Image (spheres, rainbow, N blue to C red):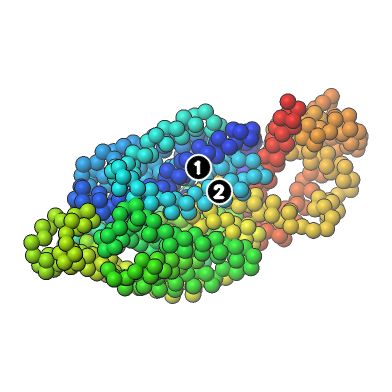
């Protein structure tokens, strides 16, 4: 979670320009990294019953998911800034190596403790892959095509939600659960090799300040809370010294985190954001949505395998209605918001539908038919999808442009934290209820060995009369879990009513229909990319005479359109590339230099530019005219970019960097295209 620097670099580095083939190879490499990291959030859900039967430690089942999520959350904070410091290519490759190492150890695990530790290692690498992949898109994808690539990358999150549980089930049924982790190794090796050959070296011109202490404190505080929730009533009594100590220690650590953030130069999570009521409401709702989504997806396969008796593969397939509802509602809400500009109704409706879906799922039992179960899952998915998509958009709409990255990352952080807490609390409720339920079932089924009821495969070996009480015990346990999460969803419904609806500015409206906004990982370059997209959207929607002619007239300048154009060509090339030549302008605009030479000569005769052979430069008078036109552009944009403050030095610096980046990208792309045509 990073904020944009207050001052722009003196000479922004020109972005790399890649050919079409290399751009596509880079994108495939990035997608592979994103796919691996996102896939491992959900791939183990269908394998968990078998893993527990093999390794034991059912009380720690939730930590197989939670360890990955917590490590991923911390990693995304650090890696975004490490990419700025050391270059995103090397950080992307190192993240892949760490991820592969975690995958190998997870596949070779012979105890639940070793598996959990390996999953944490995987999470560190996975978080690095996701956040670096998003930043690489901004570095190497052409500006004109970036929206298309970003949307596709965001959709990877949705696809993995479908593919993960099903793929995990296939490996579990037809090979071994260990292949849920081993499958990452060959893919990651190919990805690292492709990255070495295709991804250019890009390093930020600004050296970020890393809030190490804040990151350590929030990681330890959150881990302590999750550990206390996981162990409470399971490993230790709720009133034991260990559980009380964990909770008290976590509260102290989180309190210290707040104090550190109030004093940090670049805080991980700036405390002043909590003075924004929209950020507060969206963070709470994001926590609740993450809580319900991953908690339900982790334990739903357990219900389907034990109660319905389906295979691990089919438990992934049978959960597809929930995923279909989630993705469909996310896309529908995004489209409606982008067209109407109204978003407040969606979190309200979403949390209500989510509560209804959880309640309906709490009524399922062995006699509930698959079609009715599918309907209940679909309802839950629709509720999550309606609520999740618009939360990021609402926050991005109400913070200053220079804080977009921090605010977006903050909401994503709370969603991931909610997923961790949800998985832990689901696991605690499940473990605490399953033990007495199974003991009661075994007393009503004399002669059934306890080992036979610890796995779906063992349960299938029993007769119907023997298995019925055990099946009912599992059904009652999972129903109990879903029922007690209903109040959490209802609390979200109440909180959603406090969400203020602020008219959407162009950048937020444009992002609403992109499903990637709802699923995206934190990204340190979010603010500049959002502003670039907003500027491009404003320019595209303007009707009437060309915007440049209107700006020229409103600026009070005496320049002719031809003089303004020639000055602009010289200025941007000097600013972006450090030199301007008549040849480079001619190549970019597909014209012979002889055609353009008279226009630059007239500008030089007016005392605004110098022409020295092929080289072009500005005179002090030309620089003054450029400054006048720049002020007119900023003034014009400030009336069309809502919530952008022309008097705010940080917003102004951000706009200058965004315009520099757009000009650099467009200049480089145009010249690269002409070079390809010439060849």
Task: Work out whether residue 611 or residue 332 is closer to the camera in this orientation and state it.
Answer: 332
Q: Relative to 144, is 255 above or below?
A: below
| Residue that numbered label 2 is attached to | 152
Residue sitting at 21 percent across and 57 percent down? 460
| Residue that numbered label 1 is attached to | 31
Residue sitting at 60 percent across and 63 percent down? 335
Residue sitting at 63 percent across and 35 percent down? 20
Task: Work out whether residue 228 or residue 177 is closer to the camera in this orientation and state it.
Answer: 177
Q: Horizontal and vertical percent for residue 601?
A: 90, 33
Label 2: state its secondary structure.
Answer: helix
Residue sitting at 60 percent across and 69 percent down? 342
Distance between mark 1 and mark 2 Cα atoms: 9 Å
Are circles 1 and 2 on residues that touch, CB within 8 Å?
A: yes
Q: Horizontal and vertical percent for residue 359?
A: 35, 73
Q: Residues within 10 Å of mark 1 (few under 14, many from 20)?
A: many
Q: Earlier in the sequence, mark 1 or mark 2?
A: 1
Q: Relative to 253, is 614 above or below?
A: above
């Amino acid at each position: 979670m990073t904020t944009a620097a207050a001052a722009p670099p003196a000479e922004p580095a020109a972005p790399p320009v890649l050919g079409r083939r290399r751009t596509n190879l880079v994108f495939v490499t990035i997608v592979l990294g994103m796919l691996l990291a996102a896939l491992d959030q959900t791939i183990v859900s269908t394998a968990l019953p078998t893993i527990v039967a093999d390794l034991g430690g059912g009380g720690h089942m939730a930590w197989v998911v939670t360890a990955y999520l917590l490590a991923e959350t911390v990693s995304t904070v650090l890696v975004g800034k490490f990419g700025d410091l050391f270059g995103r290519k090397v950080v992307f490759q190192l993240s892949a190596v760490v991820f592969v190492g975690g995958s190998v150890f997870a596949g070779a695990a012979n105890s639940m403790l070793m598996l959990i530790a390996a999953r944490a290692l995987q999470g560190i690498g996975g978080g690095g892959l996701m956040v670096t992949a998003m930043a690489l898109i901004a570095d190497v994808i052409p500006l004109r095509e970036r929206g298309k690539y970003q949307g596709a990358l965001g959709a990877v999150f949705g696809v993995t939600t479908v593919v993960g549980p099903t793929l995990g089930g296939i490996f579990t049924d037809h090979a071994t659960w260990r292949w849920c982790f081993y499958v990452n190794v060959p893919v990651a090796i190919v990805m690292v090799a492709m990255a070495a050959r295709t991804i250019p070296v890009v390093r930020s011109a600004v050296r970020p300040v890393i809030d190490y202490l804040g990151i350590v404190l929030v990681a330890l505080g959150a881990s302590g809370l999750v550990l206390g929730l996981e162990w409470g009533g399971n490993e230790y009594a709720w009133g034991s010294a260990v559980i009380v100590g964990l909770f008290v220690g976590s509260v102290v650590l989180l309190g210290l985190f707040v104090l550190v953030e109030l004093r940090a130069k670049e805080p991980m999570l700036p405390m002043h954001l909590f003075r924004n009521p929209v950020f507060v409401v969206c963070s709470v709702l994001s926590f609740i949505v993450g809580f319900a989504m991953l908690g339900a997806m982790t334990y739903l396969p357990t219900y389907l395998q034990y109660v319905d008796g389906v295979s691990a593969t089919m438990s992934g397939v049978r959960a597809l209605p929930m995923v279909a509802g989630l993705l469909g509602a996310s896309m529908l809400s995004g489209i409606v918001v982008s067209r109407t500009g109204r978003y407040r109704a969606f979190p309200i409706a979403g949390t209500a539908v989510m509560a209804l879906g959880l309640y309906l799922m709490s009524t399922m039992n062995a006699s509930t038919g698959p079609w009715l179960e599918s309907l209940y899952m679909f309802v839950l998915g629709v509720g999550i999808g309606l609520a999740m998509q618009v939360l990021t958009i609402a926050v991005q709409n109400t913070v200053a442009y220079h804080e977009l990255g921090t605010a977006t990352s903050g909401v994503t952080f709370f969603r991931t934290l909610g997923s961790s807490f949800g998985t832990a609390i689901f696991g605690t409720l499940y473990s605490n209820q399953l033990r007495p339920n199974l003991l009661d079932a075994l007393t009503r089924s004399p002669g059934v060995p306890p080992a036979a009821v610890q796995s779906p495969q063992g349960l299938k070996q029993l007769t119907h009369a023997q298995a019925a009480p055990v099946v009912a015990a599992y059904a009652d346990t999972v129903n109990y879990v879903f029922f007690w999460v209903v109040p959490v969803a209802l609390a979200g419904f109440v909180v959603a009513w406090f969400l203020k609806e602020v008219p959407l500015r162009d950048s937020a409206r444009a992002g609403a229909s992109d499903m990637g906004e709802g699923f995206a990982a934190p990204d340190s370059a979010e603010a500049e990319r959002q502003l670039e997209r907003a500027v491009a959207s404003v320019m595209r929607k303007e009707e009437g005479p060309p915007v440049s002619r209107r700006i020229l007239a409103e600026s009070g300048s005496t320049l002719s359109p031809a003089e303004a154009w020639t000055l602009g060509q010289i200025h941007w090339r000097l600013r972006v590339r450090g030199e301007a030549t008549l040849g480079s302008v001619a190549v970019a605009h597909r014209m012979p230099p002889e055609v353009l030479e008279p226009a630059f000569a007239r500008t030089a005769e007016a005392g605004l530019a110098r022409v020295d052979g092929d080289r072009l430069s500005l005179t002090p008078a030309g620089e003054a005219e450029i400054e006048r036109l720049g002020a007119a552009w900023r003034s014009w944009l400030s009336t069309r970019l809502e919530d952008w403050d022309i008097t705010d030095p940080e917003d102004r610096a951000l706009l200058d960097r965004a315009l520099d980046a757009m000009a650099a990208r467009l200049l480089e792309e145009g010249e690269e295209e002409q070079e390809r045509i010439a060849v």
